[in-house]
Amino acid sequence: MSNPSDMSILYVIETQDTKGTLVASYGATADLEIADFFKEIPKKNISKDENIFM
């Protein structure tokens, strides 16, 4: 069982010269500006699942 206040989203970001991650809260305490920013990324720039290593 999980606590909803502990939920988060991990974004993996890669540009031509930089790689990084961003952890954002999920749920009622989410920062909607971060979610809106990532929604604006063109679909052609989003990696497919097979390109993500876990």
Image (cartoon, helix red, strand yellow):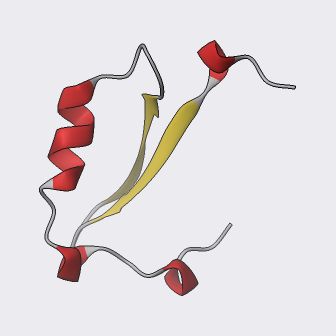
Q: Quadrant of residue 42?
A: bottom left
**Which x, y percent locates residue 44?**
20, 82
Residue at 55% in and 74% down: 52
Q: Quadrant of residue 43?
A: bottom left
Residue at 27% in and 39% down: 35
Residue at 65% in and 19% down: 4
Q: Taking 28 as reference, is 52 left or right?
A: right
Q: How many numbered badges does the structure rendering display?
A: 0
**Which x, y percent locates residue 1?**
87, 26
Q: Taking 16 as reference, is 47 left or right?
A: right
Residue at 73% in and 17% down: 3
Examine the rendered structure and indicate whether residue 8 appears above or below residue 38: above
Examine the rendered structure and indicate whether residue 46 appears above or below residue 38: below
Q: Taking 2 as reference, is 13 left or right?
A: left
Could you tell me which quadrant the C terminus lies in? bottom right
Q: Quadrant of residue 53?
A: bottom right
**Which x, y percent locates residue 17?**
23, 68
Q: Nearer the viewer, residue 21 or 44?
A: 44
